[in-house]
Image (cartoon, rainbow, N blue to C red):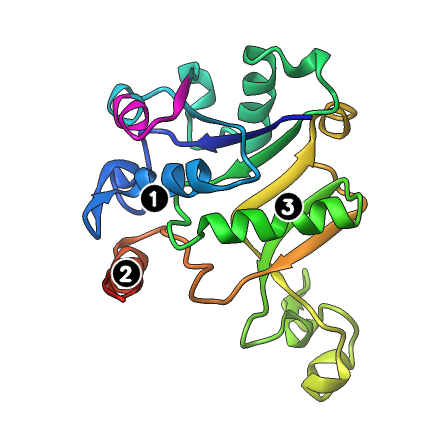
Amino acid sequence: MSNYAIITARGGSKGLKRKNVLSLAGKPLIGWTIEAAKRSASIDKVYVSTEDTEIASISKTFGAEVIPRPMSLAQDDSSSEDVLTHAIKFLGLEDKPSYNICLLQPTSPCRSNEHIDESFQIYERHNAKCVISVFEPKHPPGKAYKVLDDGSIVGVLSPSAPYTRRQDLPTTVQPNGAIYWFNVGAYLEHNLIPRESVFPYVMSEQSSTDIDDINDFLVAESILSTSHES
């Protein structure tokens, strides 16, 4: 059995232009994720899927191999799963259903190799079809409302949920986008990240920092600069 890390990184971005190559606490944003994957004891090979020549060059410098992504899969509406399906075909993994993939998004630079290894342990222990990294939000989604067509609101879980004590609501978590473990065979059943037998790997809210705009970038820079100094 082999474990392949696939890092999805396109050149375009709306919230923060060229964010994957911006210098963050002394190295390009994508470099943090490549280094975490390279240091992980659970990862055998590290690949970056990109259409961008600068991202490809930086990725090779940090020791990753590059999957050349078609421009048609590097648009604002391109899904991660379309990109994954292309990567699986490019790497010839259709004939290797026992292999595992660890999808890592470069916008989660505070995710470390320890996080990758700990999440893989959960994946193995539960014989899971999928493990995703999550965090427990300060404001539980169970207390949220949804807006109906007539403009009125009602609890997402139930009409009474928003009025229920937090400790009496089900424990809820939110995905942070940092880590997805799954099996190639399970993925190819529907060309989707598995939706069944999914287990969580809980990370701190700080480690879950996801870079979408300049404010997120500055938060991550502060976190990484401090941890690097310590």
Q: What residue is pinned by disc 1?
A: 32
Quarter placement of the C terminus: bottom left
Q: Is residue 80 left or right of residue 195?
A: left
Closer to viewer: mark 2 or mark 1: 1
Count of picture labels: 3
Q: Which residue is mark 3?
A: 120
Is 135 displayed left or right of 62 in the figure?
right
Kind of residue sitting beneath label 1: Trp
> Where is residue 157 shown, x and y percent of the image?
76, 69
Determine whether 135 is above or below 5 in the image.
below
Which residue is found at the position 60% from the left and 53% from the top?
118
Mark 2 — residue? 215
Residue 94 visible to the viewer: yes
Q: Quadrant of the N terminus?
A: top right
Q: Quadrant of residue 21?
A: top left
> Image point 47% across, 21% down: which residue?
73
* Image disc number at residue 179: none
Label 2 residue SS:
helix
Badge 2 amino acid = Asn
